[in-house]
Image (cartoon, rainbow, N blue to C red):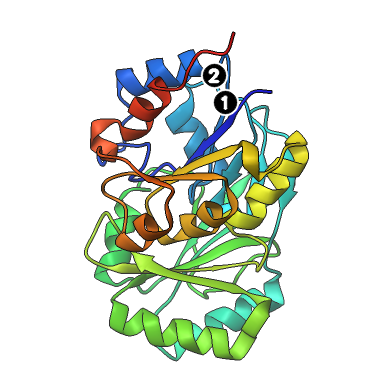
Amino acid sequence: MKPIYITDLDHTFLRTDLSISDFSTQVWNEKANDNILSIATARSYQTSRDFLHTLHLTAPMILLDGSMIVSAEKKLIDVQTINKALGDAVVEIGFGFDIDPFIIGLKDMDLNESFLYPRTLNRHQKFVLKGYKDDPRMQFNPQNKTMDMNLKIVYFGEYTTLKPLCDALKSTFEDAIECKLAPENYSDGYFLTILHPKGDKAHALEKVMHYLERDSNDMTVFGDSLNDIGMFNLAKTSIAVSNALDEVKAVATIVLPHSNDEDAVAKYLRTIPIIN
C-alpha cells in the first residue's frame, strides 16, 4: 500500500513569503505517483487551493486546524462547527478582556466561507487584516455576532491579554470548546483559536485514516507549531522542520536539518524510495 504523508503549510511547507518553490512543486508531484500526499493546515479551503493549485493532492485536506476535511474534488468529508449560541457566549467573554475576534464560518454546505472582522482592531489584528485586503469573503461584523456554523473564532493580540482570556474560556466552557494559544509567526503577537472540541488536527487525522481505511502506522506528518502536536502524537512518524517550536521538536520522531525556507519537506520527500 502507498505510504501517506501529510504536511502543515505555514512555516512547514510554505516558505515564509508564502511561496512554494519550483523544487518543492517538482518533488511533490513526482512523489504523488507512488505515495498519498496531502495537507493539514489552519487555512481555509479556498486559500489552500489557491496556494496548492499546482500540486497533486491525493488524500483529503485537513483544513482550519481540523474543523473541516475536504477532498481535492471539494467533497465535504467532515465538519465540526461551533453553534451560534455557544459562539456568541465565547465572544461575550472576550468583551471582558477588551478584545474582539475574527470569526470564520460556513455560509452553506457548498463550502462558501465568510470571514467576519470586528469594528475594533488592535495592531496585531490590523496586520492580519492587510493580508485579506481584497478577499471577497471578508465581511464587516460591528456587532461581533457569530454565525450558525462557526469553524473557528480567532483572537490576535498580546500574550498578556490572550493568556487570561484563554484561561477564562477554559474555566467557563470546559470541554465544550478547544482553546489553542500559540505565537503568531508572521508578527510579534500571539493568536488564540477556539474550535469545536473535535475540530483539531488530531481528530481530523483519525477521520482521514478511517476514510482511507488505513492506520497510524502508515502515517508520516510534518509540522512546526503547537497545533501539530496532536498529529505528532498520533502518527507513527512525526517530522519537525528546523524552525519548529521547541515544544514540537520535543515530541517529533525526526527533526530535519532544514527550515521551511530551505524546502525541508521536499528534501525529505525526495529521499523516499521509489515503490516498484
Using the image, determine if residue 17 lies above or below residue 65: above
Q: Residue 197: percent from the left, percent from the top?
A: 65, 68
Q: Is residue 172 above or below residue 20?
A: below
Viewer-side residue, 259 vs 21: 259
Q: Report x, y in % for residue 39.
A: 52, 38
Q: Secondary structure at mark 2?
A: loop
| Residue 19 position by quadrant | top left
Amino acid type at image mark 1: Leu
User: What residue do we see at 43% from left, 44% from top?
Assistant: 135
The local crowd at label 2, few if under 14, some if 14 to 19, many if 20 or more residues have their Cα within 10 Å, is some
Quadrant assignment for the N terminus: top right
Question: Considering the numbered disc 1 on the image, is that residue within a helix, a strand or a loop?
Answer: loop
Q: Which residue is mark 2?
A: 32
Q: CA distance from mark 2 to mark 1?
A: 7 Å
Residue 72, image x and y in percent? 63, 29
Q: Which residue is mark 1?
A: 57
- Contact flag, marks 2 and 1 (Cβ < 8 Å): yes
In the current view of this chain or complex, which residue is farthest to the top? 276
**What's under tag 2, amino acid-wise?**
Ala
Q: Nearer the viewer, residue 58 or 187?
A: 58
